[in-house]
Image (cartoon, grey):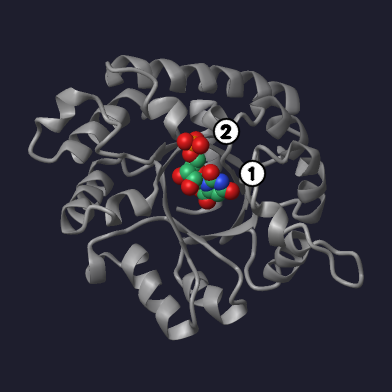
Amino acid sequence: MNSAELVKQIEQKRSFLCVGLDSDLSLIPRKFRQEKDPIFAFNQAVIDATHTYAVAYKPNIAFYEAMGPRGWESLQKTMEYIPKDIFTIADAKRGDIGNTALKYAQTFFDPASSGLNFDSITVAPYMGRDSVEPFLTYHDKWVILLALTSNVGSHDFQMTKSEDYMPLYERVMRTAMSWGSPEHLMFVIGATRSDFLQKVREIAPDNFFLVPGVGAQGGSLEDVAKYAMNSNVGLLVNSSRGIIYAGDDTSVSAAREAKKIQEEMDRYLDEYRK
Ligand SMILES: O=C(O)c1cc(=O)[nH]c(=O)n1[C@@H]1O[C@H](COP(=O)(O)O)[C@@H](O)[C@H]1O
């Protein structure tokens, strides 16, 4: 999916919500555990409940890989079930030398190779240019590079400054922007870093940001919209647990929570789109 299609969908749905499919057998309501494929049945219920409010789905690959071949099968079925006009993110956080990166790209982007056809993948920048480029060679596919993450440990490396006082997260963003255009490159910016939202938007005025950390991690959706929205909206805000585990009756509770966020987004699109 290209950015024009993504922006069109955001405008049509008045939403920049990404629903995180962090689907965990030990957390899903009991009734799904009796199904032949509990994770797929749960995901189906979440997708049915939220697809009118969401513009993206983000299966976190760890939750599927942890289940071995069964998990991979649930992931494939889930991908087939997601409506084709909705943006998909493989939250895989990959990063390795070029020839290995190419295999990761085939895994998530090449249906002839793996059966999977994601629009994008999260990638860790630590190994540099040749570990990211293989993903950027795919037409209409996106790299979502970790820049300033939502967790406490983001201070350990991302905030450290070099001799010119540039923090590492900023160097990552500025360097990566020379590898790929805003048509193919997004950045992960945690919603919990509201004090930095304005700054990251200055660094990357045209790139989309994937923003996790609202909901269960406590980040403010309004701050994200206020400080980081651009003229193309430029935001996909993710919530996982806050939506998918909001209640035992998933069809009702997931829809309720997604709708609540979408209605807030609707207001912010009027208020903060520059
Ligand atoms: O890349 C991500 O998606 C990600 C980056 C980050 O900085 N923080 C973060 O929480 N995430 C992911 O976003 C999701 C957040 O889930 P909830 O906290 O349940 O909404 C999880 O799948 C995390 O792995």
Amino acid at dot 1: Gly
Which residue does the image show at 15% across and 32% down from the upper left? 33
Which residue does the image show at 77% across and 50% down from the upper left? 200
Q: Nearer the viewer, residue 95 or 119?
A: 95
Q: Nearer the viewer, residue 147 or 151?
A: 151
- How far is disc 2 from disc 1 in space, using C-alphas? 10 Å
Ligand 1 within 8 angstroms of badge 2 C-beta: yes
- Frontmost of labels 2 and 1 is 2
Which picture quadrant has residue 235?
Answer: top right
Is 141 left or right of 245, judged from the image as shown? Answer: right
The image's mark for residue 217 is: 2
Graded by Cα atoms within 10 Å as few (under 14), some (14 to 19) or many (20 or more), the crowding at tag 2 reads some
Mark 2 and mark 1 residues within 8 Å of each other at the beta carbon: yes
Q: Quadrant of the C terminus?
A: top right
Mark 2 vs mark 1: which is more N-terminal?
A: 1
Is any part of residue 106 visible from this angle? Answer: yes
Is any part of residue 239 visible from this angle? Answer: no
Amino acid at dot 2: Gln
- The residue to which callout 1 is attached is 190
